[in-house]
Amino acid sequence: MTAPFDDARARRNALVLAIAQALYGSTTTAMVITSGLVGSQLAPSPFWSTMPFTAMIVGTASTTYPVSMAMRRIGRRAGFMLAALVGMIGALTGVTALYLRSFELFLLGSFLLGVYQASSSYYRFAAADLASPKFRPTAISWVMTGGVVAALVGTVMVMNTVDLLAPVTFAGTWVAMAVIAAVATLILSFVDIPKQDATVTSSGRPLIEIATQPSYIVAAGLGMMSYGIMVLVMTAT
């Protein structure tokens, strides 16, 4: 059953999710900036320095579908809040890894941040859930604007926290990331989207039918290449 359009609620949701996007994006920006540098400190060999960033990408890729299925069962709000809490735990795991000088533990924290990233990829779609066709593009654009804000906030945050807990470099940054994820959890509690009726079955096509379409294969291939280039550019080597 599809909820009726309600642009008043959709505007509130879009604003909440835009703020959540800015908060999430700030943690990711900090992760991109610091992961390679921390990796070079903790890794047994410089060859593995960028492995933490890879761990986050693996976390995102491996949990995007499960996160979607979880939200179908427990609702958007609960799913988003739970994933943000996982992000907070991931950041705190990273802090612990820095103090213990544990590369493996830092990889685990990075993976958990990937789970947070997986859920955030649904923010813009959630913003459109209750929006009318006229307001839907605006709702999505509000959420995406949060990412622009995040690029600035995340960079400034790293600059001001890199030695906050000296002599452990970047520990302050990862504590700040945990605090931001905790704030995001609180902000996401204001998401107001009705939970989907679990008794309603989808009449859509099977996934295998969609995945074997030539247009899907081309789109997926282009997505893989573009993300690969993005990771190459963003990751310190």
Image (cartoon, rainbow, N blue to C red):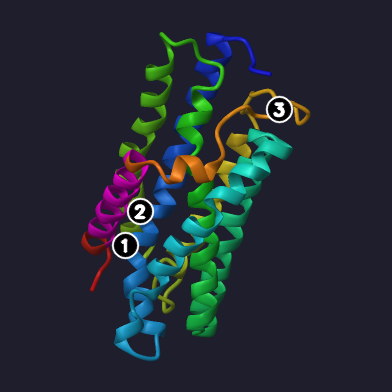
Cβ–Cβ under 8 Å for marks 2 and 1? yes
How many angstroms separate mark 3 from mark 1 (CA)?
Answer: 37 Å
Residue 197 is marked as none
**Residue 119 falls in which quadrant of the image?**
top right
Please name the amino acid that badge 1 sits on: Ile
Identify residue for label 1: 33
Quadrant in which the N terminus appears? top right
Q: Residue at x 61, y 56 (%)?
A: 86
Q: Which residue is mark 2?
A: 29
Residue 180 visible somewhere in the drawing: no
Of the numbered discs 2 and 3, the one sitting upstream in the chain is: 2
Classify mark 3: helix, strand or loop.
Answer: loop
The structure residue drawn at horizontal position 38% and vertical position 19%, both measured from the top left corner, is 137
Res 227 seen here: yes
The image quadrant where one finds the C terminus is bottom left
Q: CA distance from mark 2 to mark 3?
A: 31 Å
**Label 3 packing within 10 angstroms: few (<14), some (14-19), many (20+):** some
